[in-house]
Amino acid sequence: MAPTTTAEYRVTGDAKDYSNLKYAESVQIPKLGDHDVLVKIEAASLNYRDLIIPKGMYPFPMKADVVPCSDGAGTIAAVGSRVTRFKEGDSVVTLFNQAHLAGPLTPAALGSGLGGAVDGTLRQYGVFEENGLVHKPSNLSAIEASTLPCAALTAWNALYGVQSKALKPGDTILTQGTGGVSIFALQFAVAAGATVISTTSSDEKGKKLKELGATHVINYKTDPNWGETAKKLTGGIGADNIIEVGGNTTIPQSLKAVKIEGVVSIIGFLGGNTKDAPSVVEALMNLCTIRGILVGSRQQLEDMNKAIEVNKIKPVVDPKVFQFKDAKAAYEYQWDQKHFGKLVVEIN
């Protein structure tokens, strides 16, 4: 028999810190609609977005007192009377924007983000509309699969989302840092036969990037002109696609590294804002495409999962996996940038 209550976290209060993460037990689970499923959530992974929501820094639509986290994996515990995509016992992964099924992102889909506009995955059980889930890749555990909905799909969209500029063998991809999106982009690019140039802040992390398949690693702490260095590594041609996670503080170097007709895929703003940010005219001056990305569609997620299975790709998960009761500590750990790859909260 399916459970009727769950334990969960919600973002509530105005402290602008992680004291806003409030834990509760014995919360009533809503009745399933005809097309709803109940998921026993086994793991949830954290993204930068999750870290800034309790701090009041997130710029997109938000629900009051929301259950945080977009990323989760688990098992179907019950299904509505008209569900056709899943059955009890199926292993599933959440879709970030629940209404983004295929094609371009729409305003309606933008307002369906898990852990922001609608309740997310930091709970033991959750009710989801069946269209907002996909089957878990068969080669991944729940902990590994919980890392896919945001970071992995964002990387996949950055590399394959524009058909005319989609990743192909022989391309050069530049990734920044060792966060989830950058590492997934590195793994997908290597699997596709591309050359990867990665930047990082330490030689120790650089060794790990090399182990994952990076051809070149640049320490941006010791080489602040890493964009020029990256371009030299391509014989002066430049990178086909740059996974831009820093935002205004790193775009100037990305523009130095990108090739003519290349793409700068902006997926984050980890570096914050700066007064001397480049003008949009830089896209013309550098003859490149600057593309903003907000994750991707269910169709892209399913395509990506097929590639993960075929290529036997394993997400890079930080060795320190936090337990559900220690979720606040997980937030602090990632905020302090102690992680490598994806940080996961195991829910039991």
Image: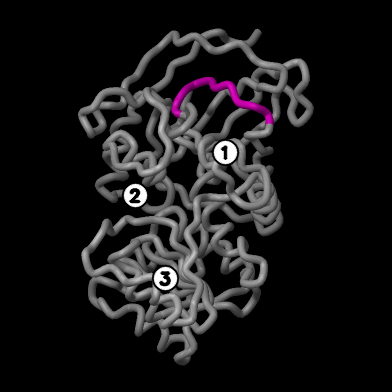
Q: Which residue is mark 3?
A: 198
Q: For the residue labelled by badge 3, is the local secondary structure a helix, a strand or a loop?
A: strand
Q: CA distance from mark 2 to mark 1?
A: 34 Å
Mark 3 against mark 1, which lies toward the viewer?
Answer: 1
Q: CA distance from mark 3 to mark 1?
A: 35 Å
Query: Residue at the location (31% across, 23% down)?
Result: 12
How dense is the environment of label 1, judged by Cα within 10 Å: few (below 14), some, or many (20 and up)? few
- The residues colored magenta run 122-130
Query: Percent from the top left, x then y, of residue 72?
Result: 52, 35
Q: Which image quadrant is residue 203 in? A: bottom left
Q: Residue at x 52, y 62 (%)?
A: 185
Question: Which residue does the image show at 31% across and 21% down from the upper left?
Answer: 22
Q: Is residue 270 magenta?
A: no
Residue 108's disc number: 1
- Name the colouring of the figure: one colour
Q: What amino acid is found at the position of numbered circle 3 in the picture? A: Ser
Where the N terminus falls, by quadrant? top right
